[in-house]
Image (cartoon, grey):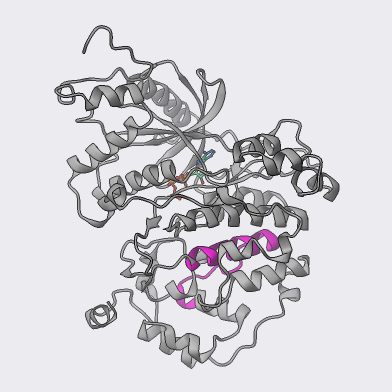
Amino acid sequence: MSDNFKFDYGDSNRYIIKEAVGKGSYGVVYSAYDTKNKENVAIKRINNVFEHISDGVRILREIKLLRHLKHPDIVTIKDIILPPSPKDFRDIYVVFELMETDLHQVIRANDDLTDEHHQYLLFQMLRGLKFIHSARVFHRDLKPKNILANSDCKLKICDFGLARPQFTDQAQTIFWTDYVATRWYRAPELCGSFFTKYSPMVDVWSIGCIFAELLLGKPLFPGKNVVNQLELITDLLGTPKPETVKKIRNERARRYLEQLPHKDPADMRKVFPMASQGATDMIKKLLAFDQDDRISASDALEEPYFKDLFKSRTEDIAKPLSKLDYGFDQKSLRESEIRDLMFREILEYHPDAKKQFMSTNSRHVYHFPSQVDRFKMQFVNLDNKGSASGSGQGIPGPPIRSATSMPKQGLSSNLVERALMSNSALSTSFTGATFDQAQELIGAENSPLSQSFSMGKNSYLGESIESELDLSSDSFMKMTLDAKERESGS
Ligand SMILES: Nc1ncnc2c1ncn2[C@@H]1O[C@H](COP(=O)(O)OP(=O)(O)OP(=O)(O)O)[C@@H](O)[C@H]1O
């Protein structure tokens, strides 16, 4: 390396790890302080990224998509720690903006959210979803735990590990072999058959379920298996029309629905006694059984329910993804190829190192100054503390969110109007502002919206990850589609 090469990366003291704040199946998320930008951040530590190829691809997909999908309603990656060497790194550390909690916790800790809360929360989820869909990306795993939240009611969609981009205008029929998303939020067209067209409507269904959970304070369709899932769905929506049932590709699922005794739709006012008429109207549109009848995120934002909120603007539309960038998802890769793609992605956050890496001859021998070793020490210390406090097995101690119940202040419609409504004093700068400025306004420390949520107790184990494994116990369909059906449907 030349002596005059200056690097502002690898600054080994930059982040001070504080505490664990969340845990997913792929990593533990810690709060940390960024001494360079003087702000709190969240750092997701993912160990042994390449142990299983599918995990490596999933993480690569997530970080690539999040670099592309920059929007105030989607969590931002701020940095990814540069590994010391491109050749043999195994762990990665992704730095996100820090959020206080997730919607799963908010729902459990707040039983007195108002219609203004409901409107604003659904509005943000749909605005984020509109943006994701405009990039022709489908999230495919929307659930309360994947919606991060702050006490000022700001929401951000996270966890793009199951997301998929689509590159053609035509919806493609694809066998969703990798689809293991949480059953409770799964659209009926995916209950029983994953051999279906990729459709953004699966995400709209999930948002409908999340919204219903906000209104109810508990999951709307907590199915024990896919049969029970369809039972619960038809209990609320009634048996689907024969034309809808005919469209279902999986024969066993179709037969099951055909033989169901007729059910009328339930009275939404009884199911959601506390909800406004506008809210139940939204539920009906988001949770249409037939995906052809389901409203799109974009159209949903134009519904009268949101008439007082900001109108969507051009910033809501994403640039299309380049197939070149995401083609990796369509072929099988070796570990070394994933590692190389991952390293190049990490370099996007380190422009000087990127220049250095791209220059000839350096890439094979060059070792980057990195803070990974120092990081590891910080994590070892934290994990030891966790073990000492009884959680054992290196699982970190109690999370930062465990103790807090934020002072409840309610959300008076007047305050909401001031901050959110288009004819308010604040709105002049908000509507005219960039999203970032708008976010600052909403998130400002003394914002009238602040402290509007109680923050729930964070559960480490949380609800178990629902996976399709349980399908083995299903009475009416084993998920292995017969080969015949696969062939005929392609
Ligand atoms: N930016 C953040 N700020 C604060 N907490 C976060 C942040 N990102 C994630 N978390 C917390 O960590 C949890 C796990 O994060 P995430 O869903 O990204 O991990 P994962 O391993 O991909 O999870 P999954 O098992 O759902 O696939 C979240 O449910 C949330 O509670």
The relative height of residue 289 versus residue 372 in the rendered view (above or below) is below
- Identified at 78% across, 66% down, the residue is 276
Quadrant of the image occupied by residue 450:
top right
Residue 410 in sight: no
Residue 87, how many percent across, how many down? 19, 30
- Residue drawn where x is 44% and y is 88% of the image: 246
| Span colored in magenta | 201-228
Quarter of the image that includes the C terminus? bottom left
Q: Nearer the viewer, residue 229 or 347?
A: 347
Decide: is 430 above or below 385: below
Q: Position of residue 426 (x, y in %)?
A: 77, 39
Report the residue at 77% width, 49% height from top: 421
Front-lying residue, 280 or 307: 307
Camera-side residue of 58 and 78: 78
Residue at 63% of width from left, 54% of height from top?
312
Q: Is residue 162 magenta?
A: no
* 297 vs 443: above or below: below
